[in-house]
Image (cartoon, rainbow, N blue to C red):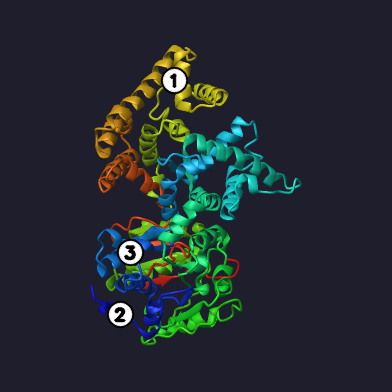
Amino acid sequence: MNNNYLNSLNNQQKTAVNCFDGPLLILAGAGSGKTKVLTTRVANLIYNKKCFGQQILCVTFTNKAANEMRERVNKLVNTKSNAIPWLGTFHSLSNKILRKHAEAVNLKPNFTILDTLDQLKLIRNILESENIDIKQNSPKLILYNIDRWKNLGLTPEEVTVNKSQIEKVMSLKIYKIYQQKLVVMNCADFGDLILHCVTIFKKYENIKKLYQTNFKYILVDEFQDTNYIQNLWLKLLINDNQNICVVGDDDQSIYSWRGAEIKNILGFDKNFNNTKIIKLEQNYRSTKNILSAASSLIANNGNRHPKKLWSEFDDGEKIQIQSFSDGLQEAIFVSDQIEKELIKNYDLNNISILVRAAFQTREFEERFIRIGLPYRIIGGLKFYERSEIKDAVSYLRLIKHTTDDLAFERIINQPKRSIGESSVKKIHEMARSKQISLFDASLQMIKEKLFKPKTEASVNNFVSNILTWKKISKDLDHVTLLERVLDESGYTEMLIKEKSPESESRLENLKELRSSMKIYGNLDEFLENISLQTSLDEEWDGDKINIMTVHAAKGLEFEVVFLPGLEEEL
């Protein structure tokens, strides 16, 4: 490895890459090459023998960004053993740490990570078991409050609410039961991944010191979008040398609605003494017309670090402003532009329609379907949220952990097994009274002959299959295991018998699932990785127009962009 990689950097970028020690704030304007600076900085630290690769902690915003950075680092350095940095999102890195120290928060290392749908289901179950009216107490609102408390670093014991705030009093009651249920089920949600790490670092000085000693250099991407607990997580990992480099742009902070705190980047130099500040102002992405329009708009924001973006590019095409009477006329104009002009010069993958709110996509979808333009919705229903995929994964989760009540409840009657709602309710009652899992409650009820004969046969067949698959899972690879499960459970047969276009599509999705599983070494690795997928980590198959919200477009680049609905109140 030689240091020729520095030759492609501009002067500001070189300064940022060669500034090794102490706190560093890199204010990276849009399109100024921040990913290049971060990856080159990692390579430069290793090249100059400042540390081994695995003594670098590099935090990114999305899994997609982490994968791109990993590929770039791999090209720059020899990635043998100690040259591989800790590189990933806050959640994926926390997951890695938590699995090493799960017992410290009463979990086992093979815990399951719940997605939003699972969280809502668990909250509904708790409301039902506590005889709380679900119509008067929205599970979504309760989950919002729980997530908010976790983002503020608060466990149930640390939350204080005013007794007059009835909705928050109820949310706190559910939060306490919710966290207890997660431990019993050996589960964690996304918020827990970071919160549990913070709890461990605060409670166990030896564990915190272990990571502080190991991480000689910390690098953070998209720092303007960090929230309270992410910032706290970082502070607990920083050692006395304070070798932390954060890269961000206060002008690109768009996530305050989900807890991001702009003060983290605006006040960074006040929190860390002797902070060096470097501005990356040369833009490599946009033409001068686009830059001057954007700069003149953002200059009206008084609460920002001043920057002056510039480019060596030409002026470029002027920005077009079109006025329409409604969303349908917008969709017709955009589709006409794409169909008559743009499709000749651009791949559809390089064309994007960015909306402010998801409801705006409908008119574009209807228009594109009508005229036959292929498109994808980014941030819509994810592959792993489709019902048949959730069912298949729930089988695998239950085989792995029979304590997974949410997986049990999802598939106990999928496909139909003549196990009615009243029987499932009785299983729940047994589980609550004995403080055991739904699976163990089913075994107990079979033993005590508490089911009707037909139901007993169905439940017995179901739990026996799960135990059989659990036993053979030790000898079968995870793809073959899934094939056995889908066939022997009757799930594949159910879809074949339906003989509808929807069932054919679902069969294709299950085929795609089997194919996607092959890249993972085993069942544990597969279940862990899919649970860490986010709405920003989408499949980009085929040549299609991209429709998404402005928030989902963060970090992406396109050659042609439409911004419909750019009007007051929207």
Q: Position of residue 158 (x, y in %)?
A: 64, 48
Per the image, label 3 sits on a secondary structure element best described as helix
Residue 490 visible somewhere in the drawing: no
Q: Nearer the viewer, residue 162 or 539?
A: 162
- Marks 2 and 3: CB-CB under 8 Å? no
Q: CA distance from mark 2 to mark 3?
A: 18 Å
Left or right: 314 in relation to 271: left
Which dot marks residue 290?
none
Q: Nearer the viewer, residue 93 or 138?
A: 93
Q: Residue at x 29, y 36 (%)?
A: 482
Q: Nearer the viewer, residue 530 or 415?
A: 530
Q: Residue at x 72, y 44 (%)?
A: 166
Q: Position of residue 255 (x, y in %)?
A: 53, 63
Q: Residue at x 28, y 74 (%)?
A: 345
Q: Position of residue 207 (x, y in %)?
A: 47, 52
Q: Amino acid at mark 2?
A: Leu
Quarter holding the C terminus is bottom right
Q: Amino acid at mark 3?
A: Gly
The mark lying in front, picked from 1 and 2, is 2
Q: Relative to 433, is 263 above or below?
A: below
Q: Which residue is mark 2?
A: 6
Quarter holding the N terminus is bottom left
Per the image, label 2 sits on a secondary structure element best described as helix
Q: CA distance from mark 1 to mark 2?
A: 65 Å
Q: Quadrant of residue 301?
A: bottom right
Q: Which residue is mark 1?
A: 443
Q: Residue furthest front?
A: 206
Q: Which residue is mark 3?
A: 53
